[in-house]
Image (spheres, rainbow, N blue to C red):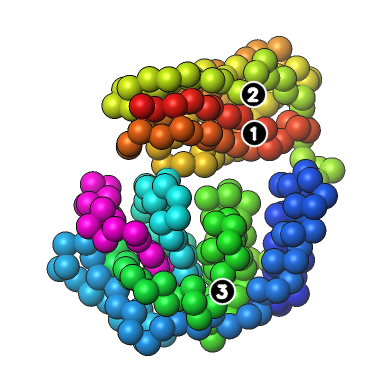
Amino acid sequence: MIRLKYIRVFLMLLLVFYSCDRNKKEAIDSIVKKWMGKEILFPENGSFITYDNRDSVDFLSMKSDYRIVTYVNSETCFSCNLRLPFWKGFVMEIDSVSLDKNIPVLFYFYPKNKSDLYALLERHKFIYPVCVDEEDSLNKLNHFPTDMAFQTFLLNSDNKVLAIGNPINPKVKELYLKIIQSEKIGRKDESKVTRTKADIGRTLVPLGKFDWRKEQKAVFVLKNTGDKPLVIQDVVTSCGCTSAEYFKKPVRPNDSLELCVTYKAEHPEHFDKTITVYCNAASSPIVLRIIGTAQ
């Protein structure tokens, strides 16, 4: 059994590591301390059903060593916040590593427009049951952090928080999977990680004004200026409207890598999207941005 204090220490370390600003570090530290070991309360009237109303699941009565709960509201771009393609892949990965544990993933969505949500679920063929929480009951019971990065929780069988954070962050995802597989959690010796140096010509690409129905592309060039191979571990976009493609083999010293970013608006908007590159460079993570107006 993994001891709670080690999980807490490990999570605090990795979340703080990915924040450069001192005030941000303190805010993260405060959130983690508040939520670790706290019991998540669930509304009695929550039901989970697929978008086509074919299947319903009583997740709350299901016995399991662990469960994951994620909450999304529609205060900002709902499509961006849901990140349905990621969650489809993550649920499949959980199923593959948890063997017979049957770990439920509880999706609580608080939409401004329920029909838009169902259309989005259908568009992505998201077959997993979700709870459409029109009264925002789950959030009212628990008063979640306002930062979307801290509205996902890994719980034990008593619904107490073992880990907090959105697994879209690859380090948080790694932590969740380690806990589920009962692997040892501890401080990673960063001194043993092979580091190199990376230089990027520009971190911001303005895309200007354009027809929102037309797909836009931007290219960032990452050069390995160190003496060890540069390895891209993961690239995470802040929005489901944005995707990134890149050559996945290690980049040799003095060679460069092109990161091709595609933005596809779902409606007219002014946007400011981030692309976070996790790699073995000393400057990792590298945060890139695209901005513009889809009209």
Report which residue position mark 3 lands on.
Answer: 143
Give the image location of residue 193, x and y in percent.
77, 40
Instruction: Report if the CB atoms under discs 2 and 3 are less than 8 Å apart.
Output: no
Q: Are marks 3 and 1 in contact (CB under 8 Å)?
A: no
Mark 1 burial class by Cα count in 10 Å: few <14, some 14-19, many 20+: some
Q: Secondary structure at mark 3?
A: loop
Residue located 77% across and 27% down the image: 196
The residue drawn where x is 58% and y is 49% is 169
Q: Position of 188 compared to 256: left or right?
A: right
- Examine the rendered structure and indicate whether residue 64 appears above or below residue 105: below
User: For this rendering, which residue is in front, 172 or 215?
Assistant: 215
Q: In the shown orientation, is residue 82 left or right of residue 125? A: right
Residue 160 placement: quadrant = bottom right
How many residues crowd mark 2 within 10 Å: few (<14), some (14–19), many (20+)? Answer: some
The first of marks 3 and 1 along the sequence is 3
| x, y percent for residue 159 | 53, 82
Q: CA distance from mark 2 to mark 1?
A: 7 Å
Quadrant showing the N terminus: bottom right
Name the residue that disc number 1 marks: 287
At 70% from the left and 74% from the top, the residue drawn is: 34
| Residue stretch in magenta | 105-125
Label 2: which residue? 203
**Kind of residue at disc 3:** His
Q: Earlier in the sequence, mark 2 or mark 1?
A: 2
Label 3 or label 1, whichever lies nearer to me, is 3
Kind of residue at disc 1: Val
Number of numbered labels in the structure image: 3
Q: Which mark is residue 250?
A: none
2 or 3: mark nearer the eye: 3
